Image (cartoon, rainbow, N blue to C red):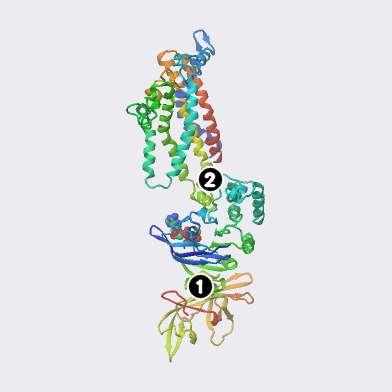
């Protein structure tokens, strides 16, 4: 087909999608962007300034004022998101890959994988409730277990105490999200020719060396996918926090998306809500762009 | 220093019997070739020796030690995989260095020493300019030599090689055969080498084990295999073109046994008549190389009509019908030096070297005597 006609044909087919994207994605984004700069006295960066410097516990992004004096951790929502990423991503990568690797040739492993994947299937709202139950002092597996072990100080309802609430949610999100990581890694290992591992076994590599020198480098693509998707999920996390703690106690589990919601639905301050949204979007762009450059673009070029 | 001994090995994949009661002894420092058609179980046998496959029955011994239950890494063997199995994330240099790098501490080698050895092996296999590339940037033949290098850099008890030269061009393959054979002689590492190329087997092997349908049909020196095939399968698998097989019957006349074949009848030499009776179906095997061709009639010679002439440079292959009188065709191939011109339709006279023919039982396929 001549180049010109082909281009025109492609445009014709793309037109409906472009129109939809324009009206339902691009326009709201631009709208949010504009609103975020709108203050009571004209346009400016005032919203951004006050959002970042805000110190009330349920809205602070960086450092809240300490209402309850001895309350650790003295951090805001943005910091919580970063902690979340810092713990969640490596744990999920490690668990997903080791489980997928160990379950590779095991009979009945598909059942285990299905159970793990359940965390992905149930609605996150339910997931949030389950996390609350899991860490409940009377019902929860973990406090009961710790009590049996004699660790009394941690045998309370984790989500009620600022010291343990955030870590409870992060651990809960590990449980909800490992199924994803496991599935991606299982697929990657499936497509890995057996002979790589066999060659390493004959060459005298230990199981440890095979895992770190052969398997891990060969599933790099899957690792990139898991890392980026997990980061994005952690940055925009909302539902499980909203259901289980609403950011409490005392802002100890506040996250960016919840702050945005609080400005929007509780304070009815659309300008600051939009500013929070823009900040969240900009932060999410970092892993997003990296992902596109590493994974999406190279494979498009290969064709 | 290693002897490999396979005792009654059986390996099944579902209904397929990939390896069927194999007994094989490989001597210390020997170069043994496993030769057989595609799917006969060569790779499976090699993988059982390497420990990548667990036999359903039988035991594997290396140096009189039962290694059947040992992990590959505890057997001290190196293997060249049929599909190369090069690590795609490592450069050629690091691929070749891999087996030494992972045991660097135990071997007491420095990185520099290892890379120097990599360079030596790479030079031997003529891949030294490729060391900085990744396997994905190499041709099939280059990848194959990297895979070979990764095995040759080690000094294990046994080298296992699964068609390590199959993807090279004809000239390079000839050179590599010689290099590999020389290296193996020099270092004296017991080697089990898989191929389906009989010329390769003939030129490299100390002994050849011919396999078919998961069984070892014959083990012997290249001479044994070529001149004294123990089974009609070996006779027809070896040689280019392979041995002619003519279906004959034995006839008892005046207390003498005769072999009655299409286009000829011959008395059977006394030496082997004790294995035979009258009215037995026999396969007569004649190598194309061991037949003289005459243009004039000769007493005792077989009259044959030329069907096709295939020039092969200094030699010719004639396709001949040795029973032109009877209605049916009995076709044999004869290799002769291209000194004279032959044309299709011409009648010629053939005199096989009767001391070098083989007789097989038509029912069992086994050699007689
Ligand atoms: N993992 C497996 N699962 C099922 N069948 C198998 C497996 N590996 C080998 N086989 C079967 O076992 C038989 C022997 O296979 P093998 O790979 O040993 O043959 P080979 O002699 O190496 O052939 P080639 O010259 O084509 O490499 C074949 O029929 C093959 O289909
Ligand atoms: Mg094979």
Q: Residues within 10 Å of mark 2 (few under 14, many from 20)?
A: some
Q: What element carries label 1?
A: helix
| Residue lying farthest to the bottom in this orientation | B254
**Which residue is identified by label 2?**
A209
Query: Residue B71 placed where, x, y %?
Result: 48, 54
Q: How crowded is mark 1: few (under 14 residues within 10 Å), some or many (20 or more)?
A: many
Query: Residue B92 placed where, x, y %?
Result: 61, 48
Instruction: Tell me what residue is drawn at x 40 percent, y 27 percent.
Output: A154
**B320 with respect to A126 (left or right):** right
Q: What element carries label 2?
A: helix
- In-front residue for pair A221/B286: A221
Query: Residue B114 placed where, x, y %?
Result: 64, 50
**B274 with respect to B131 (left or right):** left
Above or below, A243 relative to B201:
above
| Residue lying farthest to the front in this orientation | A150
Instruction: Tell me what residue is drawn at x 45 percent, y 75 percent.
Output: B366
**B140 with respect to A105 (left or right):** right
Instruction: Tell me what residue is drawn at x 62 percent, y 48 percent.
Output: B93
Above or below, A207 relative to B262:
above
**Which residue is identified by label 1?**
B235
Kindly check if marks 2 and 1 are in contact, taking CB atoms under 8 A apart as contact.
no
Q: Which chain letter matches label 2? A: A
Q: Do labels 2 and 1 share a chain?
A: no
Above or below, A39 relative to B212:
above
- In-front residue for pair A125/A135: A135
Query: Where on the picture, by quarter, is residue B123?
Result: bottom right
| Residue lying farthest to the top in this orientation | A41
- In-front residue for pair B354/A87: A87
Q: Which mark is residue A109?
A: none
CA separation in Å, label 2 and label 1: 48 Å
Q: Nearer the viewer, mark 2 or mark 1?
A: 2
Q: Which chain letter matches label 1? A: B
């Amino acid at each position: 087909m001549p180049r010109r006609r082909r281009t025109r044909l492609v445009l014709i087919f793309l037109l409906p999608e472009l129109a939809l994207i324009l009206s339902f994605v691009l326009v709201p984004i631009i709208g949010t962007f504009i609103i975020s700069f709108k203050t009571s006295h004209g346009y400016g960066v005032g919203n951004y300034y006050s959002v970042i410097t805000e110190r009330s516990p349920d809205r602070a992004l960086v450092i809240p004022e300490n209402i309850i004096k001895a309350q650790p951790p003295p951090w805001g929502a943005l910091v919580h998101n970063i902690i979340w990423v810092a713990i969640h991503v490596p744990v999920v990568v490690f668990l997903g890959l080791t489980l997928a690797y160990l379950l590779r040739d095991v009979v009945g492993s598909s059942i285990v994988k299905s159970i793990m994947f359940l965390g992905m299937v149930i609605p996150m709202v339910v997931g949030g409730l389950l996390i609350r139950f899991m860490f409940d002092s009377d019902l929860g597996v973990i406090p009961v277990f710790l009590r049996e072990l004699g660790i009394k100080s941690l045998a309370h309802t984790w989500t009620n105490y600022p010291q343990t609430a955030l870590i409870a949610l992060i651990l809960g999100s590990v449980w909800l999200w490992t199924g994803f990581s496991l599935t991606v890694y299982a697929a990657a290992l499936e497509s890995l020719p057996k002979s790589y591992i066999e060659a390493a076994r004959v060459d005298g590599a230990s199981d440890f060396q095979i895992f770190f020198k052969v398997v891990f480098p060969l599933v790099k693509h899957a690792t990139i996918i898991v890392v980026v998707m997990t980061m994005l999920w952690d940055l925009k996390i909302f539902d499980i926090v909203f259901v289980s703690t609403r950011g409490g106690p005392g802002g100890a589990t506040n996250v960016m998306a919840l702050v945005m919601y609080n400005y929007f639905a509780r304070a009815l301050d659309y300008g600051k809500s939009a500013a929070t949204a823009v900040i969240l979007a900009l932060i999410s762009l970092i892993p997003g762009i990296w992902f596109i450059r590493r994974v999406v673009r190279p494979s498009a070029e290969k064709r | 220093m290693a002897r490999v001994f396979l005792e009654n090995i059986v390996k099944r994949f579902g209904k397929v019997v990939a390896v069927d009661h194999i007994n094989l002894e490989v001597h210390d420092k020997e170069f043994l070739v496993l030769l057989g058609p595609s799917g006969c179980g060569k790779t499976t046998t090699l993988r059982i020796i390497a420990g990548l496959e667990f036999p359903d029955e039988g035991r594997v011994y290396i140096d009189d030690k039962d290694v059947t239950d040992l992990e590959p890494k505890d057997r001290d063997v190196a293997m060249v995989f049929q599909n190369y199995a090069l690590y795609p994330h490592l450069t050629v240099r690091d691929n070749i260095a891999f087996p030494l790098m992972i045991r660097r501490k135990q071997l007491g080698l420095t990185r520099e020493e290892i890379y120097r050895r990599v360079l030596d092996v790479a030079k031997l296999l003529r891949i030294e300019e490729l060391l900085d590339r990744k396997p994905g940037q190499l041709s099939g033949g280059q990848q194959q030599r990297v895979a070979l290098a990764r095995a040759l850099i080690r000094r294990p008890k046994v080298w296992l090689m699964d068609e390590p030269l199959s993807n090279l061009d004809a000239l390079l393959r000839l050179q590599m055969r010689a290099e590999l054979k020389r290296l193996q002689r020099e270092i004296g590492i017991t080697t089990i080498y898989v191929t389906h190329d009989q010329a390769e087997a003939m030129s490299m092997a100390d002994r050849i084990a011919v396999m078919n349908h998961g069984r070892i049909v014959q083990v012997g020196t290249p001479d044994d295999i070529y001149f004294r095939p123990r089974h009609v399968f070996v006779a027809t698998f070896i040689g280019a073109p392979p041995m002619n097989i003519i279906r004959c019957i034995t006839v008892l006349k005046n207390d003498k046994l005769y072999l009655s074949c299409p286009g000829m009848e011959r008395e059977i030499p006394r030496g082997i008549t004790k294995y035979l009776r009258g009215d037995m179906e026999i396969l007569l095997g004649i190598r194309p190389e061991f037949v003289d061709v005459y243009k004039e009639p000769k007493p005792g010679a077989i009259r044959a009509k030329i069907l096709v002439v295939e020039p092969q440079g200094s030699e010719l292959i004639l396709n001949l019908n040795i029973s032109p009188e009877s209605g049916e065709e009995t076709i044999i191939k004869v290799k002769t030096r291209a000194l004279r011109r032959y044309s299709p339709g011409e009648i010629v006279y053939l005199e096989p070297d009767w001391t070098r023919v083989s007789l097989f039982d038509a029912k069992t396929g086994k050699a007689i005597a």
